[in-house]
Image (cartoon, helix red, strand yellow):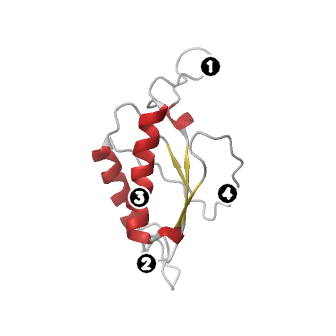
Amino acid sequence: MLLVGISIDDSMAEIDKLSKKVLSLRIFEDESRNLWKKNIKEANGEILSVSQFTLMAKTKKGTKPDFHLAQKGHIAKELYEEFLKLLRSDLGEEKVKDGEFGAMMSCSLTNEGPVTIILDSDQ
């Protein structure tokens, strides 16, 4: 599962960079259960991608999250759709699922591992 937050600093360049990273990152085990050997395509995996502006929240001040670093909805949607397009062009339409952009959704995740990795275009 990918939780994707798009910031005010993100552009098509960052979307391209992160889509390539998602597709090439070796986070899956091989047939011998050796860790970090296969990328998503080699593992014959699938992606559930969920747009998540709340990832851009800052909580340093006060008691309410600040979302000023989240990209404006219409721009974020365009960038997010491009991100999905790049993933699908490599993995195939059937291997990349997504929800409805900007909608309230219920998602369930089983985290086997546990492995949770943050990818940031600035890092």
SS class, disc 1? loop
* Residue 71 in sight from this viewpoint: yes
Q: Name the spot of residue 62 as percent of width and height, x first.
A: 59, 14
Q: Are marks 1 and 4 in contact (CB under 8 Å)?
A: no
User: Mark 1 highlights which residue?
Assistant: 64
Judge the density around disc 3: few (<14), some (14-19), many (≥20) Cα neighbours within 10 Å: some
Reading the image, the residue beneath label 3 is: 85
- In the depicted structure, whether residue 65 falls above or below residue 122: above
Q: Residue at horizontal 48%, vertical 80%? A: 30
The residue lying toward the viewer, choosing from 88 and 110, is 88
Q: Which residue is mark 4?
A: 109
Q: CA distance from mark 1 to mark 2?
A: 42 Å
Query: Is there CB contact under 8 Å for labels 2 and 3?
Result: no
Res. 6 visible in picture: no
Q: Earlier in the sequence, mark 1 or mark 2?
A: 2
Nearer the observer: mark 4 or 3; the answer is: 3
**Callout count:** 4
Residue located 53% across and 36% down the image: 53
Query: Which amino acid type corresponds to the residue marked 1 in the rendered image?
Result: Lys
Mark 4 or 2, nearer chain start: 2
